[in-house]
Amino acid sequence: MTRVLVVDDEPQIARALRINLAARGYDVLVAHTGRSALDLTAESRPDLVLLDLGLPDLDGVDVITGLRGWNPVPIIVLSAGTDSTRKVAALDAGADDYITKPFGMDELLARLRAALRRSTHLPGGEPVVEAEAFTVDLTAKRVHRDGTEVHLTPTEWGILEILVRNPGHLIAQRRLLTEVWGPTYTAETHYLRVYLAQLRRKLERDPAHPRHLITEPGMGYRFQP
């Protein structure tokens, strides 16, 4: 059974999410503070975290950073705020998706399923893709740079996988958005800028002058082996 950790300090919202998710077959844990969320993640190893940014003890972005230091669990951020800077900060810290309150349960469930698919899909019998600076094992879903394994979030992996499966080919922004985030995401190009910057920092020898993860301005991105 898929385990979801709901982190929200508003009891009514947490209860509604617990009831709706449990009714659809999910095993639901609830935390009302950032510290309890970190503790529950360590103890119970959820498959996905739904995280409200407005927590009473820790900033939600700090919770994301704390989780990303050791755990690749998919994180969907919930927030009443509409500030795009706040959204980008959460994504840059390692969140996989962002949904603004109030939201429809159908939309939340669709994004939850998409995040779980990205984190659990295992291609079979695939080769290791080699670039000068790093290698990508498509079967094991592992990336190494200079002999050291590099931790990627599920969303970072989803983007990188599409690019390395199509070496030398331009992958349009719209395709990356819809394949990684879902069919309703066609205009959130700032997501791509954030995540490609993160991938370059982790994988390129000179992130400011990338050799492998190339931007084609206004069109898309290209993996150059």
Image (cartoon, rainbow, N blue to C red):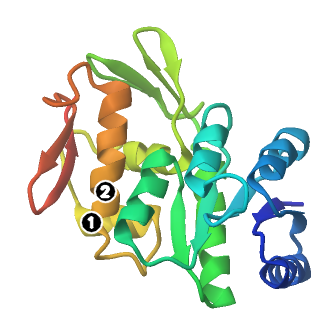
Looking at this view, is 36 or 225 the one in front? 36
Question: Residue 121: in sight, yes or no?
Answer: no
Give the camera-side residue of 189 and 92: 92
Q: Is residue 49 above or below residue 18?
A: above
Q: Position of residue 46 (x, y in %)?
A: 81, 51
Q: Residue at x 87, y 80 (%)?
A: 15
Q: Which residue is the extreme one toward the left?
A: 217
Label 1: state its secondary structure: helix
Q: Where 185 sits versus 145, above or below?
A: below
User: Which of 3 and 175 lies nearest the eye of the viewer?
Assistant: 3
- Residue count near mark 2 (Cα–Cα under 10 Å), binned few <14, some 14–19, many ≥20: some
Three-letter amino acid code of the residue under disc 2 = Leu
The picture places residue 189, in percent across and down from the top left corner, at: 27, 65
Name the residue at 27% across, 69% down: 174
Give the residue at mark 1: 189
In the rendering, at what x and y percent does residue 225 appear? 23, 28
Under circle 2, the secondary element is helix
- Real-space CA distance between mark 1 and mark 2, rounded to the nearest whole angstrom: 5 Å
Does any portion of residue 155 appear in the rendered image? Answer: yes
The residue under label 2 is: 192
As drawn, the label of residue 92 is none
Q: Please rate how many residues cluster around mark 1, counting C-alpha atoms within 10 Å: few if below 14, some from 14 to 19, many from 20.
A: some
User: Residue 217 occupies which quadrant of the picture?
Assistant: bottom left
Query: Which residue appears at 39% of the width and 59% of the height?
Result: 88
Residues at discs 1 and 2 in contact (Cβ within 8 Å): yes
Left or right: 32 with respect to 194? Answer: right
Q: Amino acid at mark 1?
A: Thr
Does residue 17 appear to the left or right of 94 in the view shown? right
Percent coordinates x, y for residue 186 in the rendering: 32, 76
